[in-house]
Image (cartoon, grey):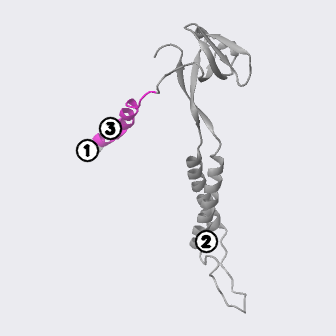
């Protein structure tokens, strides 16, 4: 009984110890030309995305997109500042999710919709070389086919590039 209590205590403490050792994201210093996402009360609830043109200890000037107009913001007004660390795709994650969902769906449908083949063909007899001849075989065949289709669809959906944002600061670290 004492061993079980000790084991339960260790298991319950493990996530706490593991999460306390996780590193906090680095704060990146903003430089001229950095792509930033700024939250400030002067912009309302929307975050503004742009490229830093210049900055001082009290003002950050940025340009949105291809616009020629500059937007100065007091650094004291900035409530959140994030710097882009680049764009990436999620092809591998999309492919994995597509495979799992496609195989699961295909397997369930193959199992549920299976019909025992009938041998009505008098000319060739009953040949089952073109498809599965049991409920489990049909489920496996459908799971494989659904997995392949899901893999392709997931990879296609994962090609959309998303931007990664990390916390930033105008001053020194």
Taking the spot 47% from the left edge, 14% from the top edge, the residue there is: 172
- Identify the main secondary structure in magenta: helix
Give SS at disc 1.
helix
- Say few, some or many: other residues with alpha carbon within 10 Å of mark 1 (under 14 / 14 to 19 / 20 or more): few
Neighbor class of circle 3 (other Cα within 10 Å; few <14, some 14-19, many 20+) is few
Which residue is pictured at 69% across the width and 14% down the height? 71
Asked whether the residues under the numbered discs 1 and 2 touch, taking CB atoms below 8 Å apart as contact, a structural biologist would say no
Label 3 to label 1: alpha-carbon separation: 10 Å
Q: Which residue is mark 2?
A: 138
Q: Earlier in the sequence, mark 3 or mark 1?
A: 1
Q: Residues within 10 Å of mark 2 (few under 14, many from 20)?
A: many
Q: Earlier in the sequence, mark 1 or mark 2?
A: 1
The label on residue 9 is 3
Q: Quadrant of residue 20?
A: top left
Q: Residue at x 65, y 47 (%)?
A: 157
Q: Where's the C terminus, which quadrant?
A: top left
Secondary structure type for disc 3:
helix
Give coordinates of residue 155: x percent, y percent: 62, 51
Q: Is residue 169 above or below residue 152?
A: above
Residue 76 counted in the magenta span: no
How far apart in space, not on screen, are marks 1 and 2 (Cα)? 47 Å
Indicate the quadrant where residue 105 lies.
Answer: bottom right
State which tag comes first along the sequence, 3 or 2. 3
| Disc 1 versus disc 2: nearer the observer | 2
The magenta stretch spans residue 14: yes
Furthest residue in direction bottom, as rendered? 123
Residues in magenta, as a range: 5-24
- Answer above or below: position of 54 versus 85: above
Is mark 3 in CB contact (under 8 Å) with mark 1? Answer: no
């Amino acid at each position: 009984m004492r061993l079980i209590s000790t084991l339960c205590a260790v298991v319950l403490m493990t996530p706490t110890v593991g999460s306390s050792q996780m590193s906090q994201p680095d704060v990146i210093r903003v430089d001229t030309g950095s792509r930033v996402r700024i939250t400030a009360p002067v912009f309302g609830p929307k975050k503004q995305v742009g490229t830093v043109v210049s900055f001082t200890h009290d003002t950050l000037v940025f340009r949105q997109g291809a616009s020629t107009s500059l937007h100065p913001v007091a650094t004291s007004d900035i409530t959140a500042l994030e710097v882009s660390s680049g764009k990436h795709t999620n092809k591998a994650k999309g492919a994995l999710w597509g495979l799992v969902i496609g195989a699961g769906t295909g397997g369930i449908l193959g199992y549920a919709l299976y019909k025992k083949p009938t041998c009505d063909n008098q000319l060739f007899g009953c040949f089952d070389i073109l498809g599965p001849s049991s409920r489990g075989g049909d489920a496996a065949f459908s799971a494989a086919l659904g997995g392949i289709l899901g893999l392709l669809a997931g990879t296609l959906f994962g090609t959309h590039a998303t931007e990664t944002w990390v916390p930033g600061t105008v001053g020194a670290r």
